[in-house]
Image (cartoon, helix red, strand yellow):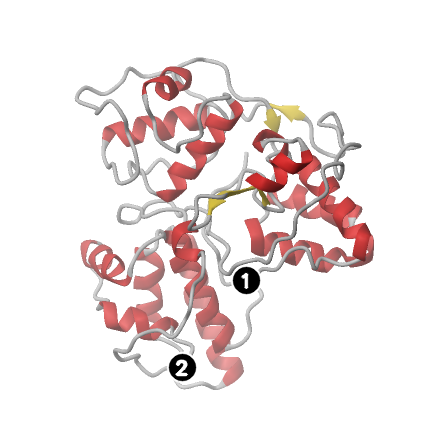
């Protein structure tokens, strides 16, 4: 089963990279600085919103203090083990760079986000499980010719098998009383928790934190695509009835490690660039879905858009298959022998 976690501090060595990764974590959480301040306070931490802004500002070279890093990452939804990783990374970078650990002060962050805010995956309740991050930055897109993926078949096999992810299965529970007819973004409580549990039983991994944030909306859109329902990201009557069914969805349940291995196999000429790009676009999550400000959705590992899929005669379920996504990306790559079709700024 896929592990759900937020962006961590792996492979960063400078204060600038540390701050950039903190910005990615904030984007992933979907929280504003005011909301981070509120969640920190609920967790017993002190983190004024102005301090949070200064912590991630690219204008300041100083590293935030350890207790501020812990409060910030905890408020963004990182579990305790990952909070410890962030603190250890901060100590390591401070020792390597000899940058003094001065306390940040107020000041607006200069980070500019294009589609990040509308693509970020979820506000979470205090100390909840961290959702997968939205890849920051935008991409220049070009139209794909209609026949680009004619040779790609969903029956392709390479390391992953088409099986339901049933690790999270559990007995079906009755619907909580008092739930609205449609459960949607912003809902919090037992009604949202039931949707999350039903999605997990269907084989779609996500945290059970009782918060219907952008990440839960994203995962619900995945289910609606597989169930051939209108893709709204809202749990209306039809969607809830489908969720109540016992059958899990059928998909290639690839872990991030399997995705990385397959990318290395399919792109031996530029394996590192392929892995870096997909990690930036979708964090190696085959089920990644994000809309832009205009409502255009981007699906799967290589973020094929709704118009691109239409032009190729494919649909979201195809794009959510990791082998299809990788093989289609390979066909596009072969035209120019590079990844200029995609851009992603970490």
Q: Which residue is mark 2?
A: 59
Vertical position of residue 50 compared to residue 215: above or below: below
Left or right of 129 on screen, residue 97: right
Q: Residue at the location (48% across, 86% down)?
A: 98
Q: Nearer the viewer, residue 174 or 101?
A: 174
Q: Nearer the viewer, residue 86 or 20?
A: 20
Vertical position of residue 319 compared to residue 163: above or below: below
Q: Residues within 10 Å of mark 1 (few under 14, many from 20)?
A: few
Residue 64: x and y in percent read 36, 75
Q: Residue at the location (72% across, 47% down)?
A: 263
Quarter where residue 39 is shown: bottom left
State whether residue 57 appears in this view. Answer: yes
**Badge 1 vs badge 2, beta-carbon distance below 8 Å:** no
Quarter containing the N terminus: top right
Dot in front, 1 or 2 = 2
Residue 72: x and y in percent read 32, 63
Q: Residue furthest left?
A: 178
Q: Which residue is mark 1?
A: 10
Residue 49: x and y in percent read 24, 67
State whether residue 78 appears in this view. Answer: no
């Amino acid at each position: 089963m896929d592990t759900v976690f937020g962006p961590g501090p792996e492979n960063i060595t400078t204060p600038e990279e540390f701050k950039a990764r903190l910005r990615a974590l904030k984007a992933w959480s979907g929280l504003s600085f005011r909301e981070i301040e509120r969640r920190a306070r609920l967790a017993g931490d002190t983190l004024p919103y102005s301090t949070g802004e200064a912590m991630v500002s690219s204008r300041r070279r100083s590293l935030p203090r350890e207790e501020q890093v812990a409060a910030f990452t905890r408020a963004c939804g990182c579990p305790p083990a990952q909070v410890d990783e962030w603190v250890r990374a901060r100590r390591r970078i401070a020792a390597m760079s000899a940058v003094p650990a001065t306390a940040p002060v107020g000041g607006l962050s200069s980070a500019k986000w294009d589609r990040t805010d509308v693509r970020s995956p979820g506000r979470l309740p205090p100390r909840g499980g961290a959702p997968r991050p939205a890849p920051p930055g935008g991409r220049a897109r070009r139209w794909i010719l209609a026949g680009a993926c004619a040779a790609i078949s969903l029956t392709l096999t390479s390391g992953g098998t088409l099986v339901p992810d049933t690790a999270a299965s559990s007995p079906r529970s009755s619907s909580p009383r008092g739930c609205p007819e449609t459960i949607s973004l912003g809902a919090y409580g037992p009604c949202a928790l039931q949707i999350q549990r039903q999605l997990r039983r269907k084989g779609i991994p996500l945290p059970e934190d009782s918060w219907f944030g952008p990440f839960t909306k994203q995962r619900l859109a995945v289910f609606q695509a597989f169930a051939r329902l209108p893709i709204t990201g809202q749990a209306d009557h039809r969607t809830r009835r489908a969720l109540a069914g016992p059958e899990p969805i059928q998909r290639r349940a690839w872990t991030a490690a399997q995705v990385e291995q397959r990318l290395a196999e399919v792109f031996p000429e530029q394996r590192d660039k392929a892995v870096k790009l997909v990690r930036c676009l979708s964090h190696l999550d085959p089920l990644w879905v994000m809309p832009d400000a205009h409502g255009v959705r981007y699906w799967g590992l290589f973020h094929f858009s709704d118009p691109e899929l239409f032009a190729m005669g494919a649909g979201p379920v195809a794009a959510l298959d990791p082998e299809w996504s990788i093989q289609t990306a390979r066909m596009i790559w072969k035209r120019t022998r590079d990844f200029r079709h995609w851009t992603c700024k970490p």
